[in-house]
């Protein structure tokens, strides 16, 4: 099961159509497939309906933008811009969050709404506090190379990577 997919609903970062993804997942014998568009949940309705129709379990999620400090900060560190090297990511981190159940589904909707209304600075952002407020029923993945854990590992800063992973585990629980 692929848990990290960007559809056409990921602005300038995905070009795959939902039906193509689900057809391919079905042809590979996958039982489920996730949608994790960048910073939004816009694909959910189409993805869910198409997934049910094709017999592939739709897993709803998003690759949220995560503020480096808090979602209320509006400073240069939170802006995207040129990196110092090819691996260093600027602007907010990325964090992939999936709905584990109906409670998680509603919590992801709340987080997405608050990311746009409270955390918007260049991009809609969540933070650790918001994830903690809505941690029930969600599963958190480390994201991509732009996640806070991956960025620390790319700097060979293993203690910081472990600290970030431990902090998130404390928020959502070891099983999530």
Image (cartoon, helix red, strand yellow):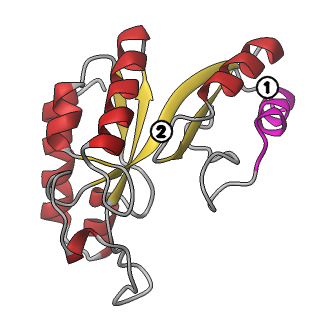
Nearer the observer, 113 or 15 = 113
Q: Of the numbered discs in the image, which one, if any, rests on residue 29?
A: 1
Q: Quadrant of residue 123?
A: bottom left
Q: Quadrant of the C terminus?
A: top left
Q: Which residue is located at x 32 percent, y 32 percent?
A: 111
Question: Where does residue 96 sit, x and y in percent of width and height?
Answer: 42, 42
Q: Is residue 129 left or right of residue 65?
A: left
Q: Residue furthest front?
A: 117
Q: Would you call the spot at circle 1 few (<14 residues within 10 Å), some (14-19), or many (20 or more)?
A: few
Q: Nearer the viewer, residue 61 or 44?
A: 44
| Residue at image location 38% in from the left, 35% down from the top | 112
Residue 21 magenta: yes
Question: Any mark on residue 62, and which?
Answer: 2
* Magenta-colored stretch includes residue 148: no
**Residue 127 locus on image (x, y percent):** 21, 46
Look at the image and tell me in which quarter the N terminus lies: top right
Relative side of 120 to 27, left or right: left
Tell me if residue 173 can be seen: no
* Mark 2 crowdedness (10 Å alpha carbons): few <14, some 14-19, many ≥20: many
Q: Which residues are magenta?
A: 16-28
Regarding residue 37, the answer to whether it shows in the image is yes
Q: Which secondary structure lies at badge 2?
A: strand
- Disc 1 secondary structure class: loop
Closest to the camera, between mark 2 and mark 1, is 2
Counting residues from the start of the chain, the first of labels 2 and 1 encountered is 1
Residue 159: quadrant of the picture: bottom left
């Amino acid at each position: 099961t692929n848990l990290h997919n960007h559809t056409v609903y990921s602005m300038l970062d995905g070009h795959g159509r939902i039906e193509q993804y689900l057809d391919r997942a079905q042809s590979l014998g996958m039982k489920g497939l996730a949608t994790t568009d960048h910073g939004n949940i816009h694909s959910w309705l189409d993805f869910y309906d198409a997934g049910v129709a094709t017999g592939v379990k739709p897993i709803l999620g998003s690759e949220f933008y995560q503020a480096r400090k808090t979602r209320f900060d509006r400073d240069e560190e939170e802006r995207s811009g040129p990196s110092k090297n090819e691996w260093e990511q600027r602007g907010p981190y990325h964090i992939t969050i999936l709905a584990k159940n109906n409670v998680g589904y509603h919590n992801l909707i709340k987080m997405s709404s608050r990311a746009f209304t409270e955390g918007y600075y260049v991009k809609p952002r969540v933070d650790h506090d918001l994830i903690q407020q809505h941690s029930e029923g969600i599963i958190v993945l480390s994201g991509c190379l732009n996640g806070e854990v991956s960025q620390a590992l790319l700097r060979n800063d293993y203690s910081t990577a472990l600290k970030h992973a431990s902090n998130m585990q404390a928020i959502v629980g070891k099983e999530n």
